[in-house]
Image (cartoon, rainbow, N blue to C red):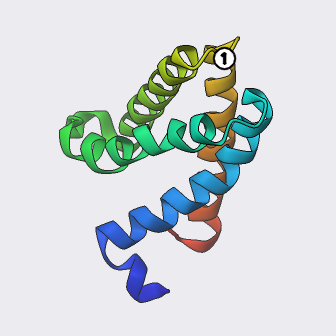
């Protein structure tokens, strides 16, 4: 698996799967079991968070500034997706779900150094 993590795309794939493992069950509960809505929420935002934000955020923001901006984008993007799909309390739920996966991802990175 370490070979996979050596490429940007491989590291993204690991992070994406990890995100889906955390977020999809939560979104399934929130959406009443709507798989497409649940799977697509972070599928729509995750590539932008992973590939675009590190490239466009000013270096003066530092790592944590970039993470904050990327997570805010994810929450707002997923809120819009949830609202379009008729989910009540979309902003609250997008925030909760993204906080869970962000904390999980940061703990994974701190504990195991991946992704």
Which residue is more in the foreground, 63 or 21?
Answer: 21
Q: Position of residue 52 (x, y in %)?
A: 25, 43
Q: Residue at x 69, y 23 (%)?
A: 93
Q: Residue at x 46, y 31 (%)?
A: 74
In which image quadrant can residue 29 be found? top right
Q: Position of residue 107 (x, y in %)?
A: 65, 57
In which image quadrant can residue 86 be found? top right
Above-or-below relation of 38 to 30: below
Which residue is more in the foreground, 110 or 92?
Answer: 92
Q: Residues within 10 Å of mark 1 (few under 14, many from 20)?
A: some
Above-or-below relation of 15 to 85: below
Q: Residue at x 57, y 44 (%)?
A: 39
Residue highlighted by disc 1 = 87
Above-or-below relation of 2 to 25: below
Q: Position of residue 62 (x, y in %)?
A: 32, 40
> How many callouts does the rendering have?
1
**Regarding mark 1 in the picture, which secondary structure is present there?**
loop
In which image quadrant can residue 33 be found? top right
Q: Position of residue 100 (x, y in %)?
A: 69, 41
55 left or right, relative to 93: left
Q: Residue at x 66, y 44 (%)?
A: 23
4 left or right, relative to 95: left
């Amino acid at each position: 698996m370490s070979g996979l993590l050596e490429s940007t795309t491989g590291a993204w794939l690991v992070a994406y799967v990890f995100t889906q493992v955390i977020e999809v069950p939560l979104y399934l509960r929130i959406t009443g079991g709507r798989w497409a809505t649940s799977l697509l929420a972070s599928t729509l935002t995750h590539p932008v968070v992973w590939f675009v934000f590190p490239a466009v955020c000013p270096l003066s923001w530092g790592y944590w500034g970039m993470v904050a901006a990327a997570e805010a984008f994810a929450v707002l993007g997923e809120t819009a997706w949830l609202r379009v799909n008729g989910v009540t309390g979309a902003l609250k739920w997008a925030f909760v779900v993204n906080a869970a996966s962000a904390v999980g991802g940061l703990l994974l990175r701190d504990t195991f150094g991946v992704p």
